[in-house]
Image (cartoon, rainbow, N blue to C red):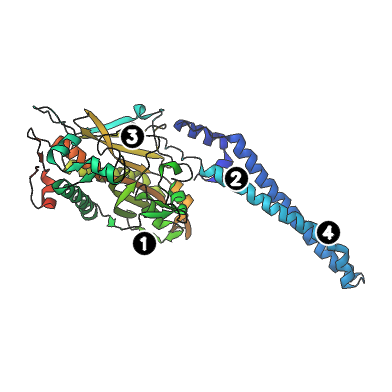
Amino acid sequence: MLDIKAVRQDPEAVAAALNKRGYPFDVAAFTALDARRKQADIDSQNLLAERKSASKKIGQLVGQGVPVEEAKAQVNDTLARIASQLDALTEQAKSVQGELDDLLLSVPNIPAPDVPPGASEADNVEVLRWGTPRTFEFPLKDHVDLGDGLGQLDAETGGKITGSRFTVMYGDLARMHRALIQFMLDMHTREHGYTEIYVPYIVNRDSLLGTGQLPKFEEDLFRLEGAQGYYLIPTAEVPVTNVARDRIFEDSELGEAGVRFACHSPCFRSEAGSYGRDTRGMIRQHQFEKVELVQLVRPGQSDSALEQLTGHAENVLQALELPYRKVILCGGDIGFSACKTYDLEVWLPAQDNYREISSCSSFGDYQARRMQARWRNPATGKPELLHTLNGSGLAVGRTLVAIMENYQQADGSVTVPEALRPWLGGATELRG
């Protein structure tokens, strides 16, 4: 969440900054709530001072010769009134603070200064393109038709087992899916310095509050019925980042480049609001797999860390020789908790378009403040908020789709990218 001190200091400036993402921050509502909280504090302090004065009066009366019990009786009514008023004020202050917390939990992060203005993905700014899309000399098939031809991609059975937006894979296609996971994990741990981590796929409400999925995006989550506030994870970002919740890292634990985690996990999303979009095939599923990259860094490192993390995701695409483009998201398209995001969009020949395959974001101290994730600054000896970052390195299903479509052959087979072959026992193609 935002730093309440900064919001108090200049709420109009905060509102202006949030306007970049099209968020109407209600300055009047915040100011009124904060004034009520401040008044409750003032009233409490006045009552405490009055109670202290009343307690002193007992000693004064005793000093004047009044018996102790009689002296207490003279001020008991005053003390009882103060106690009652204090109880009421405490409840009032608690209620107002709760409203203030709820308001701040619903306010998104402030975009970084270099985030471009804009209202939607149409206003995102292309940074670069890598690779040249292949020219095909035969009729293109999309990944669904290719999978059907191989006899290895089965949405019908997935729908029978569960429902729409679930898929079953068989044979070499399932094997390639698994190989991609291992390929990505090995690249990130061996070449980019990430520590592999395994985490629960079920999280509690506090974890989702910490990374910003709650309270705003509850409809996008799968909540477990009958459980005590448990949810299936929408992304490994949630459990991995929450490793740092309520923790203070010593500077030595961060090392030179901060803490880096790489995690493979399934992801579960209700895809609320996306009905009618990408209903064919594996582009938008309720269950899919990702290799997630998470970094915890010192505040001064987060800008360079975002460039590095995005580069690590790009390295996977380059190794697989998949054409892609990199865009910086505009204010209107950036995620709720992010202050800056790069999307990597892979070329899908059957769609004649680039589609998102990785989203790499810096959150500044926004998530860390919600989670109280901190490090001890050796210069001051005091705990300070970390900066958090994450990105897909990559979304596995979409990578599989991209390989199928970009490496398809006229006979319906799919060539295995050269870099991936060692993870498939040297296999060079997928055939039915």
Name the residue: 44% across, 60% down. 248
Q: Three-letter amino acid code at disc 4?
A: Thr
How far apart marks 2 and 4 lie (CA) works out to 31 Å
Q: Which mark is residue 328?
A: 3
Between disc 3 and disc 2, the foreground one is 2
Name the residue: 69% across, 49% down. 40
Q: Three-letter amino acid code at disc 3?
A: Ile
Residue 265 percent across, percent down from the top left? 30, 52
Mark 4 lies on residue: 78
Helix, strand or loop status at disc 2:
helix
Q: From this viewpoint, which residue is outermost toward the front? A: 160
Decide: few, some or many residues near mark 1? Use Cα within 10 Å; few <14, some 14-19, many ≥20.
few
Q: From this viewpoint, is residue 224 visible?
A: yes
How far apart marks 3 and 1 lie (CA) works out to 33 Å
Name which of mark 1 and mark 4 comes first in the sequence: 4
In front: 129, or 379? 129
Q: Three-letter amino acid code at disc 1?
A: Ser
Q: Three-letter amino acid code at disc 2?
A: Glu
